[in-house]
Image (tube, rainbow, N blue to C red):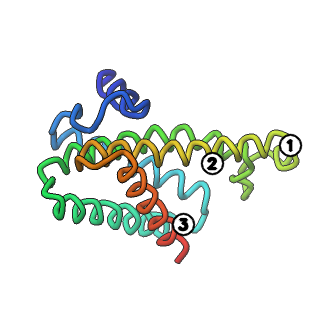
């Protein structure tokens, strides 16, 4: 298990691409399960609209993202790489979510009942944590761009633009 965590960490640091991920359905299943449970917990924590609403939102966003990725890979003739690419993307997103939770908490994003301490609301460090969150978001785009670059045999710029477009699409979908 530690080898898989190290693998995702190396992808997170742009040292390895999705081609280094084993083509394993069980690894994809476990990674997707961890991704889903972690994101569901975070969504329920941040947006207390209920478990059902968070589940539907997570399913729509993730499903749209994965369907768009599959369509792009189909058009590019790279469907054989889909499983490894998907496993890498989900694994890296687990790391991103784990890193963003404490930042979000201290940035004052969890100020609903039972959320962050009221003293944090006026903290001088709040802008720093928000800036770190923004930096983590941008780094996530670069990571996804790197994964798309390697999986689709496109330039790094094209990979980053694709990652940015996917992220903006997800944000637009969430804004509905």
Name the residue: 55% across, 73% down: 175
The picture places residue 141, in percent across and down from the top left corner, at 47, 49
Q: CA distance from mark 3 to mark 1?
A: 29 Å
- If the image is split into quadrants, where does the N terminus sit? top left
Q: Is the C-beta separation of discs 3 and 2 under 8 Å?
A: no
- Mark sitting earlier along the chain (1/2): 1
Q: Which residue is mark 2?
A: 134
Of 18 and 54, which appears nearest the observer? 18
Q: Which residue is mark 3?
A: 50
Q: Residues within 10 Å of mark 1 (few under 14, many from 20)?
A: few
Residue 53 is tagged as: none
Q: CA distance from mark 3 to mark 2?
A: 26 Å
Q: Is residue 116 above or below residue 50?
A: above
Q: Give left or right: position of 108 versus 73.
A: right
Q: Give left or right: position of 70 versus 165.
A: left
Q: CA distance from mark 1 to mark 2?
A: 18 Å
Q: For the residue labelled by badge 3, is the local secondary structure a helix, a strand or a loop?
A: loop
Q: Give left or right: position of 121 versus 51.
A: right
Q: Which residue is mark 1?
A: 123
Of 13 and 109, which appears nearest the observer? 13
């Amino acid at each position: 298990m530690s080898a898989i965590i190290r693998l995702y960490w190396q992808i997170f640091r742009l040292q390895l691409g999705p081609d280094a991920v084993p083509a394993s359905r069980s690894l994809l299943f476990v990674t997707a399960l961890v991704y889903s449970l972690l994101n569901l917990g975070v969504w329920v924590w941040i947006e207390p609209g209920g478990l059902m609403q968070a589940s539907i939102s997570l399913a729509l966003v993730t499903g749209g993202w994965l369907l768009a990725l599959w369509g792009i890979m189909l058009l590019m003739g790279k469907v054989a790489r889909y499983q490894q690419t998907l496993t890498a993307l989900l694994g890296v997103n687990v790391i991103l979510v784990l890193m963003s939770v404490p930042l979000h908490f201290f940035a004052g994003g969890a100020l609903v009942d039972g959320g962050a301490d009221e003293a944090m609301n006026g903290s001088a460090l709040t802008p720093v944590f928000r800036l770190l969150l923004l930096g983590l978001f941008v780094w996530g785009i670069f990571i996804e761009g790197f994964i798309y670059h390697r999986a689709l045999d496109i330039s790094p710029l094209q990979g980053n633009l694709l990652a940015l477009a996917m992220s903006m699409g997800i944000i637009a979908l969430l804004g509905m």
